[in-house]
Image (tube, helix red, strand yellow):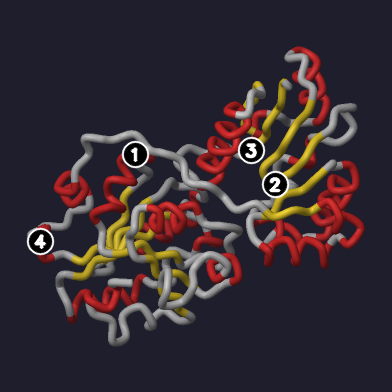
Amino acid sequence: MRLLFLAVLRRHTGNAITAQRVRDHLEAAGHVCILKNALDFESPSEISNFIKAESLEAAMALHLYRGGRLLPGHGIPFGIIFGGTDLNEDVKQGEKNKVMGKVLEEARFAVAFTESMKETAQRQWPHAKDKIYVQSQGIATVPNTTFNWDTFLQRSEINQSADNLHVFLLICGLRQVKDPLYLVDAFSEWHQEEPSVYMVIVGPEVDPVFTREVKAKVKRTPGVRLIGEMAREDLHAVVKNCFAVVNSSVSEGMSAAILEAMDLEVPVLARNIPGNAAVVKHEVTGLLFSDPQSPSQGLAPGDLNL
């Protein structure tokens, strides 16, 4: 079958990585999957022309609003995969909520990454409850890289011996929903007590205005560093060498950074929100925190050997 798969494909973001995984799975099952950036299409008519030109038989979208709104009315079956933004952010906006409900009316199926996401969607759109299923994300194999830890430390302007460092890695696109500044002051205080402790924020500049705010804050905050996006294979090399991966998001669907850290057997500290709590079992597969001071209160390196 020839499939169209729509997703927002900003480089080195969780959405792009998830879309690539889904595409690889579909192609491994014998389908032809044409992955396209939803932002490249301005209207359903452009999608219609593309479907005809490529002789497509079905379609999928990652995100009910961002991609799904372009799929109804083209005469081919389609399904959608919920994103965290759908259920945590867009659902609060009246017009977007209405559009998403109409998309679900025509969709053949909808996939949520967790049971809590499924339950939220069923409460919001009860007419679609029988077509919503749960399927967790998988972990894709990442090729080896020559990128090394010393290179990362130089790029982060951390001038200390690698043997004595405890680097906490926050991986996120710079936008407000990821709340990268939530832990900045707490980690700076920790760094001033324990100079070996650093927090490094890694990710693309998604929101230009918010990015300026983050850069200004980090610049004047000891113990916190900010570097731009990294190729995925290089980022995996960094994750393997860091002390722990941190997530401070206001909302998540299912964090790719958390999943990949777990797969690489790296400790995870995650903000206690439904999307994270669905993945991280406190003090078993990671640590959940509810306020900025929690990660540093009484925490020593040995405490993260989960």
Label 2 packing within 10 angstroms: few (<14), some (14-19), many (20+): many
Distance, label 3 to label 2, CA atoms, is 10 Å
The kind of residue tagged 2 is: Ile
The mark found on residue 188 in the picture is none
Q: Which residue is mark 4?
A: 163
Name the spot of residue 127 as percent of width and height, x first: 92, 57
Do callouts 1 and 3 mark residues in contact (Cβ within 8 Å)? no
Question: How many residues crowd mark 4 within 10 Å: few (<14), some (14–19), many (20+)?
Answer: few
* Relative horizontal placement of residue 231, taking residue 112 as reference (left or right): left
Residue at 55% in and 43% down? 18
Q: Tell me, for residue 233, which label it has, or none.
A: 1
Inspect this view and state whether residue 219 appears. Answer: no
Identity, as a three-letter code, of the amino acid under mark 4? Asp
**Earlier-in-chain disc, 4 versus 2:** 2
Q: Amino acid at mark 1?
A: Glu
- Residue at 36% of width from left, 38% of height from top? 231
Q: Are marks 4 and 2 in contact (CB under 8 Å)?
A: no
Outermost residue on the front side: it is 29
Query: In this view, which residue lies farthest toward the bottom?
Result: 298
Gap in angstroms between the C-alphas marked 1 and 3:
21 Å
Picture residue at 84% right of the left edge, 41% below the top: 108
Screen quadrant of the C terminus: bottom left
Point out the image quarter for the N terminus.
top right
**Rendered image quadrant of residue 92:** bottom right
The residue that label 2 is drawn on is: 81
Structural crowding at the residue carrying mark 3, measured as other residues with C-alpha within 10 Å and reported as few (<14), some (14–19) or many (≥20)? many
- Residue 7 is marked as 3
